[in-house]
Amino acid sequence: MQDFPSGKFCEKCSKCIVDFTEKTDAQINEILQTANGKEICGRISRRTLSLAATGIILITNLTFIQAQIQNNSEITTEQQAVDITKVSGKLIFKETQKIIPNAEVYFINKDKLIKSVTNQNGYFSLDIPNDLIEEENVLYFSFDQLNEEKLKEHKGKDTVSSYNYGNQTIIFSRKEKIENRKFQIGYKEFVIGAVVIIENPPPNYYYFDGRNISKEKFEKLRKENPQYHYFSFEGKEADIISQDNFVDTLYLLYSK
């Protein structure tokens, strides 16, 4: 809103908005008398509303505006609830039933990457825009950084706590609700429902931020930008992410 002598001018409403929050009783009364019964748009606080008891029209209008704000807020909250799919859960090491903190969890779409990291209780949560949710989707658990940290911490000792976790994926459908799910993490595969989770090697198709590019350009980008997020998939995961049934293997690179 643009500055105006008596307040702010709202281009959408084509009206001047009066800031009543810092006005005295006398100033409020003067504004009401000057308005002479005409509608007034204003910014108020609870204190202002009590001071405006002498202006029935103002109170009526402001009450109506307050109701509009409340309704708009409810609509916005409802839209957010509808537009977002929440995926959450807890990662537990199958061998010891210990929680796995600081693991990286990714929702992988060909065009966009959404990341979360498990907290000290092994819990993660992802808010995924519904326009990214397909009939089938891929959730990827990466333990590369965690394995490196554990290797340094235990210095290669042959203990259960120093075993490497295998990077794994799960496939979930649009209709499937994944909230507060417990994921048993093993070495190379684990089962959730009837879905077998497998690991993934080399490429056939190359995508950078959702764009199909050549192998040479892909490898150059990856070499010049080691901070970019890199993944490779094959089989069903590659088909789901690429939305193409004729992809054998798939390489993905994300700048964000």
Image: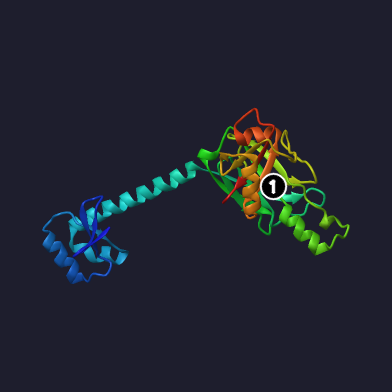
User: In the rendered image of this protein, does residue 79 appear above or below residue 117?
Assistant: above
Q: Position of residue 179 (x, y in %)?
A: 62, 44
Whole-percent x and y of residue 3?
24, 62
Horizontal and vertical percent for residue 63?
27, 54
On screen, residue 160 versus residue 241, left or right, reads right
Q: Nearer the viewer, residue 140 or 242?
A: 242
Name which quarter of the figure residue 242 lies in: top right
| Farthest-out residue, right | 158
What type is the residue that disc 1 sits on?
Answer: Phe
The image position of residue 254, as x and y in percent, is 59, 47
Mark 1 is surrounded, within 10 Å at the Cα level, by few (under 14), some (14 to 19) or many (20 or more) other residues, namely many
Kindly indicate the quadrant of the structure image that contains residue 51.
bottom left
In this view of the protein, can residue 100 be seen by the observer? no
- Secondary structure found at label 1: strand
Q: Tell me if I can see residue 233 in this picture.
A: yes
**Residue for point 69% across, 54% down:** 103
- Which residue is depicted at the point 27% across and 65% down? 48
Q: Is residue 178 above or below residue 117?
A: above
**Residue that label 1 marks:** 141
In the image, 210: left or right of 143?
Answer: left
